[in-house]
Image (tube, rainbow, N blue to C red):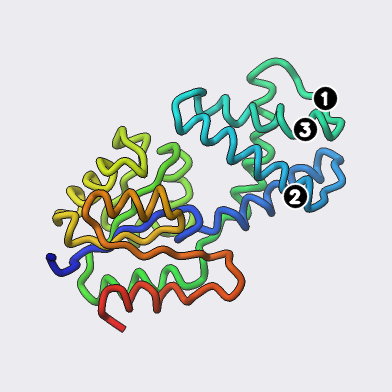
Amino acid sequence: MAPSRAVGFDLDGTLFDHRGAARTGAEQFLTGLGVTVTPSVLDAWSAAEDEHFERWRSGEIGFQEQRRERLRTVLPPLGIVLPHDPDALDSVFERHLDAYRAAWRTFPDVVPLLRELRTRGYRLGLLTNGSAAQQSEKLAATGLDTALDVVCISERIGVQKPDEGAFHALADALGVPASACFFVGDDPVRDVAGARSAGMRTVLVDRYAHGALDVRHQVLSALGES
């Protein structure tokens, strides 16, 4: 097997604290609508996000429509009357996006880890499912756009994880064979199984588990650099 010369990363839940930002943003958004925010309300918002994002990912609905469907799923049961006009619904969702954007952050160890890997001579890439506009905006807002050599976003490359074609696109962009690339992600199917099917070695991380392992140690150990 070829020695690793590149490391690819997932974005949400791996480098970027999507769950933390999403819950903070949802709490502020819902409070602004007059909703009494409880853990069950936040869980319902998260469940609707997962459900309708997957509908978009599978091609069932458009990206903007999955946002509208999240509002339609969560808000009427909470007593919020929604407009019927799609543009008016988008304006409501934009209030959530403003709160979500304000909470955007990477995990604290991310930038030091990326700098260390670059110092050690690794090419660094990103492979993420999602809309090119929003994922690119996250990278620019957090400074990750300048910390990575290659960015592959599913909407832009035309194939999504866990399809092995997405991982081959990443390896090609990095200029290495898939066997010379490690992939780091938090999803056992989309990230780990997908990368392995393409011939990459993998590191599975869980940022939100109680007593979660140190990601720097996990990555460097897998690379034989610890």
Residue 19 % position (x, y): 60, 54
Secondary element at tag 1 = loop
Name the amino acid, label 2: Glu
- Residue linked to disc 2: 27
Whole-Å distance between the Cαs marked 2 and 3? 13 Å
Residue appearing at x 26%, y 49% in the figure: 197
Secondary element at tag 3 = loop
Residue appearing at x 82%, y 38% in the figure: 33
- Cβ–Cβ below 8 Å for labels 1 and 2? no
Name the amino acid, label 3: Leu
Give the vertical position of 208 relative to 223 (above or below): above
Name the amino acid, label 1: Val
Q: How crowded is mark 2: few (under 14 residues within 10 Å), some or many (20 or more)?
A: many
- Residue linked to disc 1: 81
Residue 23 % position (x, y): 67, 52
- Cβ–Cβ below 8 Å for labels 2 and 3? no
Front disc: 2 or 3: 3
Whole-Å distance between the Cαs marked 1 and 2? 18 Å
- Residue linked to disc 3: 75
Q: Nearer the viewer, residue 180 or 16?
A: 180
| Res 4 quadrant in image | bottom left
Residue 201 is labelled as none
